[in-house]
Amino acid sequence: MSRLSSKTLADLPADVIRPGYDRARVKAGVVHLGIGAFHRAHQAVIFDDALNAGDLRWGIIAASLRSPSVHDQMVPQDGLYTMLVRDGGSEQARVIGAVQAVIVAPQDPQALVAALASPDTHIVTLTITEKGYKLDPATGALIEDDPQLAADLVSLDTPRTAPGYLVAALARRRAAGLAPFTAISCDNLPHNGTRLRNAVLALAGRHDVTLADWIAERGAFPQTMIDRIVPATTPQDIAALTARLGVEDQAMVKTEPFIQWVIEDIFCGPRPDFGAGVQITAAVAPWEEAKLRLLNGAHSGIAYLGGLAAIDHVHEVLALPEARIFVEALWDEAETTLSPPPELDVAAYRRELMARFDNPTLRHRTRQIAMDGSQKLPQRLLATIAARLNAGQGIDALTLAVAGWVRWQAGQDDLGQPHVVDDPLAAPIAATLGTATTTQQRVAAILAFDAVVPPALDDSAQFRDALTRWLTILENDGARAALASFRPD
């Protein structure tokens, strides 16, 4: 079977949307670190829109910081891939042409540094997940005993980490008399721009204080909030698309119609005339907080409780009336902690979220959402719980979601089927919980695990009691029983 490529593009069915620009004339004004499915369904689409609008400065050089798998999927296809937008019974196929090249950073680190240092590069975007910033989630300091970061602290001749690549390239830009690029974190982290800036400045300062000062003065690290549900692609998806297109696309992505990118109005160089789906604003934090505590907080609760109940997909979890009651109650609790911007109608946003979760064609897997929970829980659930406790409010639904995460660490669901706890702190969490023989001891152990749980919550009798109660039900009776017993305040 032939692959999707520049040669086969013209042979696709007439209803497939194709790039409306000459790819040979495109300049790569963007470098993206962490080219996974989310980038291909989100930021790459936004820059593809800019190219289609006639501004040919916004092609993308993408880099994988770990595996060559995406490179191997995309390079034989000349960087082309199909985005399927699914909504109920409808499906629209669009070929995205913005990606000009894919670099496997560990195989050729200097190629990535050169791309970042290029005069054509104006914007760098990152989807490297929370663990890619090499910052301690509790303190915000560099994790100096991380082997990759430790190497970058010694030398940046061959960088190993995202901050290392950025610092090496910014040093080269300064030496060449070029301005810095605008570096935009697109990961679900509170104050993600500040975190990226802190990581870059801390590492730069360890090598050259004057470089750190130059970056601090002239660089730009806007806060952002991104939103689009992008389930993992399956072999069945690829086979079905092959039958539809007549060519094979190993790099395809599937997603929903909704797309949102809120960017703080801080740039240090050119930017596209962003179109639909992008909002430039003076204050991202209220948008970011609403997404983290409503969409992402509910997603985590659904993932752990649904996964424990051996339910594969989000829409299948929400087919349970008791699960819908739980999600609405979690939103009720989280909503009181928000300071939404005037443009955000929270009630309408909640209705829209539920409709997105209900979309059966996305088939968003609970196990996909459950990954990296130790990096996600602090901002998605624990910060919300802390805010509710400070206000003297109840935390029952939020705590049930946290109890689901604790129970998930056992590595098997309620039917006794094993699962991998895919998390950078899985081993130390397992060691922490492994010495506990009772539910109360497991709660005490996890609350003392300060790499995830802030000390204020460890000291809260209300949180401790609620977590013990829910974890007891989950361990004895399972997630379905816990949801069935849940009663909103």
Image: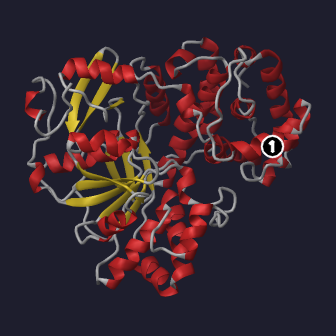
> Residue 166, image x and y in percent?
42, 68
Compared across the picture, whether 189 is left or right of 93 comes to right
Q: Residue at x 42, y 62 (%)?
A: 222
> Residue 34, image x and y in percent?
42, 50
User: Helix, strand or loop at disc 1?
Assistant: helix
On the image, which quarter does residue 304 sit in? top right
On the image, which quarter does residue 405 sit in? top right
Compared across the picture, whether 364 is left or right of 414 comes to left
Compared across the picture, whether 21 is left or right of 441 comes to left
Q: Which residue is disc 1 drawn over?
A: 431
On the image, which quarter does residue 55 sit in? bottom left
**Depth order, front residue of 294/426:** 426
Q: Residue at x 65, y 35 (%)?
A: 421
> Residue 155, image x and y in percent?
52, 75
- The type of colouring in the image is secondary structure
> Residue 167, image x and y in percent?
45, 72
Compared across the picture, whether 5 is left or right of 67 comes to left
Image quarter of the C terminus: top right
Residue furthest toward the bottom?
210
**Dot 1 alpha-carbon crowd within 10 angstroms: few under 14, some 14 to 19, many 20 or more:** few
Amino acid type, label 1: Ala
**Depth order, front residue of 300/156:** 156
Instruction: Please say whether residue 326 is visible from this viewpoint.
Output: yes
Q: Residue at x 28, y 56 (%)?
A: 61
